[in-house]
Amino acid sequence: MESNKEIVIDKKKMVNVKKDKKETVTDKKEIATDENEIVINKKEIVTDKKEIVIDKKEIVIDKKEIVNIKKPKKGKKDIIKEKNIVNEKDIVNEKDIVNEKDIVNEKDIINEKADDNDVLDSGKKEIIKMFNENVKGKQIDTSNSNQKHAGKEGHWLEKQMQIKHNAKNEPDLFGYEMKKQSNKITFGDFSASEYIFNSHNKREYINKKNKWTYEENKLTRTEFFHYFGEKNPDKNNRWSWSGKCVPKYNKWNYNGQIILIEDDNICIYYSYSKDTRNKEDDTLKKLPDYLKKDNLLIVFWEKNKMKNHIENKFNNKGFFICKKTNDIYDKICFGKKFDYKLFVQYFKTGDIIFDSGMYSTNTRKYSQFRANENFWNKLITEEF
């Protein structure tokens, strides 16, 4: 047989065979090649220590494609000839075609394109290993943290899982976002695209929606607390926009606020006619006329901003939650990934809420989105 020819056992799949430098032995039934043997008869095909049995089937050999075989030394009688290899009677049904994955080649045992599940399993295994070695069964030690800080346990957990505390909009480990068990579990602290008290160059959409100009409708952050927030008696009457004065989806609260979803944008509106507070209150008496109207947009999250927040963290490979019994972590749970569409869906059902913690003596917005533990448990698919 001439060199650089090809024999194909499958019209689509090709097997490279290196010929033994010394000799090639052929007859009507078999081709012997360097440490690999392909036996073609009515019953079996043997390739590289692996056997595929085709009982009472026929083998298709494409005339156009022939396995590359080095030309044998001159003088050898047993030279493979095309007519001895290509036999039109040897026909195989498509369902019996030899798949290239079944042709054993030590270098090809591992598929170049790893299956997504294998990648996920690899990440999960490493995370589970870290949890078992550094967290599971260990006493939580927050002695080196600020004891007044509400997130001190979370920081301890991050340290044990070798996660550097950061505000990056990306998953924590191997494509997974980490969460710790709590009555309310936070998606993240996502400041709004615009607040009514923003400076003129950061309040464009609100101005357009309310038909305002910044010069005529200026509002300070302190005024925002007075008009839309409330005093906290447990904090020396500190003004805040948190608790019951913060609205929920599609429900007017006592101070005339509501959250609506418009084209997947999250919007908070104020209506003077829905405000049930005492309008004779000294603070409300100062309410400017331009706020004594209905359906005024006061806070706004642009959909693409929220989509990036949610999907960058949770739509990669999913999340995992470290759970504990009697203040000792003893279980790690993995949940499926989800996108902004699902987030909006559960925001509308009330499973996900906007939980503002903004207050007057801190410049942070504390615009957090949370869901209770039952919601997260519904998304869990594996426990270890």
Image: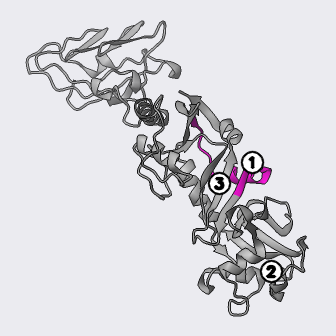
Rounded to the nearest angstrom, the CA distance separating label 2 from label 1 is 34 Å
Q: Nearer the viewer, mark 3 or mark 1?
A: 1
| Magenta stretch contains residue 343 | yes
Tell me the number on the disc at residue 283: 2
The x, y position of residue 326, in whole percent, is 59, 30
Kind of residue sitting beneath label 3: Tyr
In the displayed structure, 28 sits above or below 112; it is: above
| Magenta stretch contains residue 371 | no
Kind of residue sitting beneath label 2: Thr
The x, y position of residue 299, in whole percent, is 71, 71
Circle 1 SS class = loop
Name which residue lies at 28% across and 28% down: 107
Q: Nearer the viewer, mark 2 or mark 1?
A: 2
Kind of residue sitting beneath label 1: Asp
Rendered image quadrant of residue 272 = bottom right
The x, y position of residue 39, in whole percent, is 32, 11
Q: Earlier in the sequence, mark 2 or mark 3?
A: 2
Task: Using the image as rendered, state which of residue 54 and residue 145 is in the foreground.
Answer: 145
Residue 76 falls left or right of residue 177: left
Q: Badge 3 is on which residue?
A: 340
Q: Badge 1 is on which residue?
A: 351
Dot 3 surroundings within 10 Å: few (below 14), some, or many (20 or more)?
many
Name which residue lies at 71% across and 83% down: 207
Bounds of the magenta segment: 334-354
Q: Earlier in the sequence, mark 2 or mark 1?
A: 2
Check contact, mark 2 vs mark 3: CB within 8 A: no
Tell me the number on the disc at residue 64: none
Rendered image quadrant of residue 8 = top left
Circle 3 SS class = helix
Residue 161 visible in the snapshot: no
Check contact, mark 2 vs mark 1: CB within 8 A: no
Q: Earlier in the sequence, mark 3 or mark 1?
A: 3
